[in-house]
Amino acid sequence: MSNNKHNIKEFLMQPMTMASFFMVAVIIIFPEHCFSQHKKKLTFNVDMNTQKTDLNVQLRGDFAPLSWYEGLKLSDPDKDGIYTVSVDFEIPEGIEFLNYKYSLNGDDWEAGQNRKISIHDDSNIFKDKFRYAKKLENPFKKFIGKWKLKDNNWEYTNEDLSVRYIKRPNHFIICKEVNTVNSVLLVVDTGASHGSAYWIYDADKKEMNSLSSFSNNRTGVGTGTIDNKGNIESKVRFQGVNDGRYRIYVYTWISENEYIIKSYEYDKYDKRTGSYYSGTFIRID
């Protein structure tokens, strides 16, 4: 520190500029020990509570060499189900706590909040038990499969709101999971037109969200609910409809292999306009 004082004295004898004034302030306010780091080696052990070996268990955290995006792999050399890793940290001054969490198979995080330990704890070894998250079941699972229009019957209203019944022999829907267990993709072929919809379930809000696109220029965004029987009610607004109109889609299950869809149009005052269409679908796979 004495050398710092000598350097500061010589520096102050030079012509003062704004930049040099700032440098002096930094030296005075932030002496060099504020930028120091101390090294510490911590060992993490996690009980996976399983008979399976060679699991891909990783440790993630909020400062180097840990990261929330890429984990450090733990190992179980004695095959006792306890996975371990030792980590050398260079801990900056002012850091009091380390937040960390374990993950399994890359993207399966353990349940609960982040784990938190004091960097200055006397212990260098930490023993945890993996908190397995409850496996979620896709709320749209009943829809997964291939469907066709029952008896080819389709009901709808014309522009004058008169009811029409027509045959659609080539109306098919294929519904499948896409990477996650809280979403499905529906690919629709009516014979005359094509489209798709993507449904996502938000478990926190207990609501389903949808994006749809039909005939190249009819795109919709919707929000709704799905009950424990798989019945859906969703409110969808379409691009280009600027007068407040929207549609309510209702999917009601008749049996495990049959459901009916009804779509009602509403105006900006939340009153039905009289426009609707409806069809019953049966499983064919």
Image (cartoon, rainbow, N blue to C red):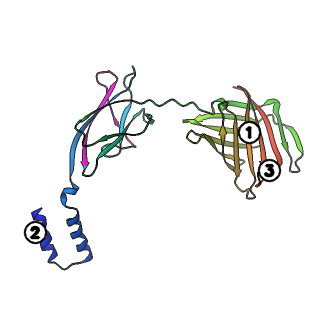
Residues drawn in magenta: 69-91
171 w.r.t. 271: above or below: above
Q: What's under tag 3, amino acid-wise?
A: Lys
Q: Is residue 218 visible?
A: no
The amino acid on which the numbered mark 1 sits, given as a three-letter code, is: Val
Residue that mark 1 sits on: 250
Tell me the distance, in whole angstroms, between the alpha carbons under discs 3 and 1: 16 Å
Instruction: Give the residue type at disc 2.
Output: His
Q: Using the image, determine if residue 51 lies above or below residue 60.
A: above
Residues at discs 3 and 1 in contact (Cβ within 8 Å) = no
Q: List x then y, in percent, for residue 28.
A: 20, 66
Mark 3 lies on a secondary structure that is loop
87 within the magenta span = yes
According to the picture, the residue beneath numbered tag 2 turns out to be 6
Say which label, 2 or 1, has the lower sequence index. 2
Q: Which residue is mark 3?
A: 271
User: Which is more N-terminal, label 2 or label 3?
Assistant: 2
Quadrant of the image containing the C terminus: top right
Residue 199 is situated, as x and y percent measured from the top left of the image, at 63, 40
Per the model, the C-alpha gap separating discs 3 and 2 is 82 Å
